[in-house]
Amino acid sequence: MGHADDTRTISINRRRFVIGSAQAAGGLAIGLALPGCSTTGTEDAAAALSGDPAEVTAWALIHPDDRVVIRVARSEMGQGTLTGLAQLVAEELECDWAMVSTEYPTPGENLARDRVWGNFSTGGSRGIRGSHQYVREGGAAGRMLLIEAAAQRWGVDAATCSAANSVVTHGPSGRTARFGELAAAAAQLAPPAEVPLKDPKDWKLIGTGVPRLDTADKLTGKQIYGADLNLPGMVNASVVACPVRGGTRKSYDAAKVENMPGVLAVVPLDEDAVAVVADTWWRANQAIKALPVSWETGESGTVDSAGISAMLDEGLSAEDAFVGNQAGDVEAGLAAAATTHEAVYSYPFLHHATMEPMNATALWTEEKCEVWCPTQNGEAALAAAADAAGLPIEQCDVHKLHLGGGFGRRGAGDFVRQAVLIARTMPGTPVKLLWSREEDMRQGMYHPITKAKMTGGIDADGKLTALHLRISGQSILAGLRPSALQNGADLATFQALLPASDHKISYTIPNLLVDHAMRNTHLRPGFWRGVNVNPNAIYMECFLDEMADKAGVDALVFRRQLMADNPKGLAVLEAAAENGGWGEPLADGRGRGLALCYAFGSYVAACAEVSVDDAGKLTMHRITAATDPGHVVNTQQVEAQVEGSFVYGLSALLYGECTVKDGQVEQDNFHTYPSMRIAEMPQVTTIAMPSGGFWGGVGEPTIAVAAPAVLNAIYNATGVRIRQVPIKDTPLRKA
Amino acid sequence: MAKLNINGETRELTFDPGTPLLWVLREQAGLTGTKYGCGIAQCGACTVHIDGQAVRSCIYPAEAVQPQQEIVTIEGLSDNGEHPVQQAWAELDVPQCGYCQAGMIMAASALLADNPQPSDADIDAGITNICRCGTLQRVRRGIHRAAELATEVS
């Protein structure tokens, strides 16, 4: 199985895919007429440039012709982390960016090498903020080794040499050597004990807007996603699992589909699913749709949205609740307030709806199990594969492929497990499992459903002096990682409301109580881009607007009064407000709204301008978004993430809702779970204002402010206060 | 067995009656650039051209395509990514995850073929593809830029 590959067939023996390349993007041809000042000028140039690459630290593979392959442990799912992480390595390595490409090491290699590449998990906006230190150190150590190799070759002091643009130069003599010439020797040297990093003021590549490394193949159809993989001899599978979470398979009638064209096998999986394997996926899916299956759904089969809503309502005033943040005495504060106000908001279950449905390809033998899949967590996928394979983890590996979206859904191993279980029934045959869109919608890991009751008090000067924010609803950690609960509490529920951490509350409120009545459902919760800041920012930011309104104080002024201890938050808020036209005259029917959040270690704010016509039709005209993530690695990718955050967050605000009937999610495709289209897209202006000194996330924080800024703008335009999202069923004009 | 003209090449392909063009392209012709997103013509990830018209191939029966009709997929839009839409997309770094982008590019190129200088309103009406990463703002800029590039070339 060692054939040469083309765009459609990838040899199983090919261990890695080149996953992004400046050469491809920039169209740079690599010829023999390389610049560089070889000290081996008498050698045959072609021979000098061929040969094996050398690993100069685990992070960089340097070829004799100066090509640099940078290893990226985190998964690229559109957020640009592959390019950003490569920039961090290349900045310190001092290599020529035009010669950089990237590759994924496998989780198996990471395990075998004592996790030299650290954590593979790609979520929580941690790609860069969670690994910037060690990947930059990897690049810097590589540069030091290359300089040392040059110094040894020339018999000079390494301190008199420097590196830039893939060339080491000896200052006093002007001698030079290319990285490609030095790499083999550098790879033999002991890594330096101390690895100082550049001062940010000396960065040349970090903080620029270099093009992504992975764009070219996405424009021509060449990019292979998991769903596109084709291995020699591969068969295809489609699956159906019990649509009621926790239910089991009662019976199925394989005979009804076994004679359908192309069908090879009908395979029961665990206690809750059954798959059909066929020569093509279309045929497998036709058969799975025709397969009679009955399910045992138990009590969960009677659950519906109304019942869940009633359970959450009860939690809003329940006696017992986990405390997430507390200051002063909220009861006394409310009692002493000049004016009090109460409101209840709600936030629904949401589905991730990645464009590419879940999939994985597995090849199992008694000796080995290999999986190819788009995953946000290669190591979790490896663990899932090994468990399902019944093999020691050392005999398994996962080859990561590009993700057609992730948003948190692809951190799980459920689809990997299914693919391996099927492959176990046909040793030696690669099996590609692809979920249908309908299966993907039904087997989601849904954004948790919550409601919140806010009770606020303002003093005679119109300042917020007391706030009780009670959340009632589902906990992600209770559903996914019970071991991460702290004395039963899920602190992630309080994202952006906590007293400290990278999700610290933005405001200082003298009398504050934030608590959570945990009310779980049988639906499986998940981390959904932005996670709990999505509802929490609506609860806080929309209720602050309500209180400002009660106080008769401008919403910006009202917030500013509470932000003496949060200058960076105030800076982004004021930047968004000023550039968004806050306080300037509005055209008829228009309104503006503000929102602020500190999430995933970054300060973000937005000012939205909308209008609602007489028929109640909403138009989102423009949004000005400010973000301070500490450092910006790639300017144009920060803009892309901010713009994309509004599409994802506003799609949820406008349409996103999964409802439950007879225990199962009712929405099954994009006609019942719509997503925003270009006609609805507001003009987004991004203000990146990195203040330095910290590393915050970029992929998620801005989602937090998308919905509340627009909701506040709708109120400003219409006087209609929407407390239940999505807004699709709410009239936006008073009758 | 049916004859299909795909990217300028006549292919003899075997498929079951009722198989959507999408799956014939992906599984019989080996052209996986055209994506499966929804199967119900909602998302547009499967968009291809048939005689220059943008078509959602996930609901278009392959047997409904006549042998003389010209099917163009993302792989056949240009030899090497030099179509103005692809060039504009590269210039602006439009894709994020990229999964929907083949469909976006095919929809945009069909729009521009019909309307070389589309207004924002024309784009709003003509581009209804879903992108969950949220590239919509750059898609709009990309279409305007492609219109400029096409003018420069011609």
Image (spheres, coloured by chain):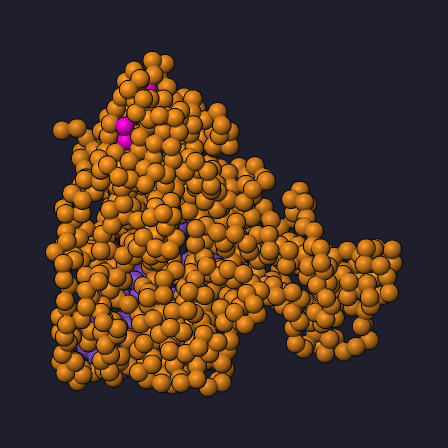
Q: Is the magenta stretch mostly helix, strand or loop?
A: strand
Q: Position of residue A259 (x, y in %)?
A: 17, 85
The colour one sees for chain B in the rendered image is purple
Query: At x 36% / y 41%, what residue is drawn?
Result: A494
Q: Position of residue A332 (x, y in %)?
A: 32, 22
Query: At x 60% / y 49%, what residue is drawn?
Result: A206
Which image quarter: residue B71?
bottom left
In the image, is A355 to the left or to the right of A159?
left
Vertical order, B85 against A112 (above or below): above
Span of residues in magenta: A454-458
Residue A490 visible? The answer is no
Which image quarter: residue B119?
top left
Q: Where is residue A568 in the image (x, y as percent from the top left)?
A: 51, 32
**Mark count:** 0
- Residue A302 on the magenta segment: no
Vertical order, A574 against A443 (above or below): above
Vertical order, A67 against A638 (above or below): below
The colour one sees for chain A in the rendered image is orange
